[in-house]
Image (tube, coloured by chain):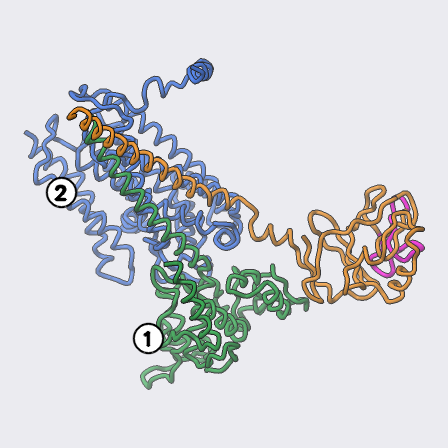
Amino acid sequence: MAGTSENAVGHGAESRRGFLKILTVATGAVGAAAIAWPFIDALGPDADGTAAAHLIVNIAGIPENTAITVTWDGLPVYIRKLTAQQTADTQAVVTSTLVDPADFTDRVKPGYESFVVVVGLNTGAPCALEGNAPADPRGPFDGWLSPCDGSVYDPLGRVRGGPATKNLAIPRFKFINDAQIQFG
Amino acid sequence: MSTDVKKSWLASRLPCPAKESGHCAPTMERGRRYGATLPTLISATVLFLLASGLVQAVYYNPAHGFDSIQFILRDVNSGWLIHAFHVTGATMLFAAVYALLFRDIYRRAYKAPGELVWLLRVKLYALLLLVGWLGYALSDGAVSYWSLTGAANAATGLSGVAGAVGRWFFGGPNGAGTVARLEVFHAVLALTVLVTLGAQRCAARALARQAPAPKNPVSCHPYYTAQTFAALSVFALIFAVLVFFAPHFGLNHLNTAASDTLVVPAVLSPPWYLSPVSAVAGVFATAGGGIFGVVAMLAVLAALPWLDRSGTSNKRGKLYRLLIGLLLLDVIGLGWSVSDPACTAAGSLTLVFTIWYFFHFLVLTPLVTALEAE
Amino acid sequence: MRRIFAPILAVGLLFGAAAQAEDTLSPLHWQSQGSFGSYDKAAVQRGFLVYQTVCASCHSANALHYRDLEALGFTPDQVAGIASSVKLADGSPATLNDVFKAPGVGAAAFGGALPPDLSNIETSRPHGLHYIYGLLTGYAAAPASVTLLPGRFYNTAYPGNQIAMPQPLKGNEVTYADGTAATLPQEAADVSEFLAWSADPNLNARHEVGLRAVLFLLFLSIIAIATKRKIWRETV
């Protein structure tokens, strides 16, 4: 009788001490993890890096028939404002005749049809394109011309001739208001 | 069975000498006080400072020191916390180092055969003063800019060997490239602190092994690991209170403004842990005198094992304890006297405190210890 | 506690919808003061309006970006709108990632000394909150014993009492959207709170995380000391 109750007491004390130790070690581990987290977090992208990844560009000042160049994600991006004539002409093109078929609505954002945003790299032989300023050589379609392999593009960045077979890439972007677009 | 196989696979390929010799001797005496955990707390804090310093170094730009620190505080995720860790960690580190030094002075732990441990601890303190001052200079604030300019210009203007060393260290008067080189020195000297800590641990362990075997030995784990863990928890609690609720504790508020070459702030007090040394340096009129004062201050501290004239007696009499209490007040007074230059009475007390400091070590310590030796 | 907090907050906000400002003026206090303070976002927004209208024409705030304003309770669209209403030196509207526009004028235009950058002004002055408030409300006529230097104005809070800045606030420089009366003390208190936020934008997070961390470490310390004592008692 006495023996079993002594054993019972002994077991109780041991499990209590074991519980306290386990609780202490576990709490310490939680504390260590909580302290380690800020170090890991601080090495993640900072606000400037995030800002560069979500670059905002002012487009209100772009004159018609001209394009500006910005750098985003390491790539040159051309932002061109179309004239009404260019918009009408490009809408009139039959898409099935294109080398890389793409509709007018695929190339511009709804509500902002006069702006074209494309990555300014030739999809054939890699090089930059000419045609941002009105006076630049633009090729027969009034878009862009690649000086290294002679590929030509229309104002929407669709390939219309030359060795290149794909349209100019369109980066991820959105209009945050009438005057600014945000990439990423 | 499988864990035994695993252990021997690893153990046969990477035998760990520390585990063999037992970094924590399995036969230790009981009842060691919490004060004995101070070296572990210091090591943990140094590692913590290294980690937070490295993360900050990713973003720090020595050409625009203040602006890059603002960037860390505002635009880096948890950057404010990492920076507070580093700044408050320095405060906690110095608190622990001062506590360790005073504890060793009080317990006369510097006596033979413990002289090497003591010398290594004084060296650690001296190194940390330099690392701390370099970190202060890196903050590129309105006050630290003038501390850096004063030190760099004075050091490069010295004559002879001292001037050559000064010019080598600073690369010339405070200019465009000074902070960049000091950042590298800050990191390199911090690693030297780690090495000194390691040497100090080795010496302390060797000292412990020389002590007579205890009557009722106890194993380090869990007996002393529990004590160290408890000490770390309380240390971390104090640290957290300072980090989150008093991030500028002991620091000059004026230093949160950007450095300005045209404006000298009204109060040029350094961080609290640098103020006793800054006070002694300021007592001397010339830059060379200031350097001499700091070196002398550290030298008398290091010479303590030989200034103590008590021979083999370990008695700590009332007079000695009074002396240590006065030393503590004296060091606190030294620091306080440079914290507010507007208080003119405090300024004249700096000389008194400095004289008492040297008087304590050079005159009173040999006298009192010889007197009280049995 | 949390279960009753939300309905109370909802009721409070109902009444607060047609709000006047929480009274910071009698007695003079700010919600961000003290160990558990947090920023009154409405006050900081009002303070930003005062800053933008009055202070930004002469003072820079080089550590602030327009994107930082999202922490004040503005939506990203609102912040983009605030940024684009600012015309940078080259005429283009500012974007979210631009630094707060600096006046762009040299020190000569201000009589030799540039107005200080306001990003950290409140941590770099002793008792910054009260100091800024006192400075803005401390303009007075110089007493007979004081001779004002040329180009200086008398201010009770400024060290030396002669400040080169003409009185920036007189009351009603702005109209608050939430209907608060834009008296001089109210504007001064609001812009002080804004500058407090500017100097220490992480205060809210610091106090929140800090309370949890301290309570956690208190608990950990207690059980760690208890474990140590138990082990020491029970080691044979």
Q: Is residue A67 above or below residue C30?
A: above
Residue B318 location, quadrant: top left
In the rendered image, the residue lying farthest to the left is B374
Magenta span of residues: A130-150
Q: Position of residue B371 (x, y in %)?
A: 6, 34
The circle on residue C27 is 1
* Amino acid at dot 1: Pro
Q: Which chain is orange?
A: A
Q: Are marks 2 and 1 in contact (CB under 8 Å)?
A: no
The residue indicated by pointer 2 is B323
**In the drawing, does residue B160 fall left or right of residue A89?**
left
Q: Position of residue A66 (x, y in %)?
A: 82, 62
Question: In the image shown, does B251 or C6 lie closer to the viewer?
Answer: C6
Which shade is chain C?
Answer: green
Give the secondary structure at mark 1: loop
Q: Residues within 10 Å of mark 1 (few under 14, many from 20)?
A: few
Which shade is chain B?
Answer: blue
Give the secondary structure at mark 2: helix
**In the drawing, does residue A44 fall left or right of residue B306?**
right
Q: How many marks?
A: 2
Q: Is residue C3 above or below residue B120?
A: below
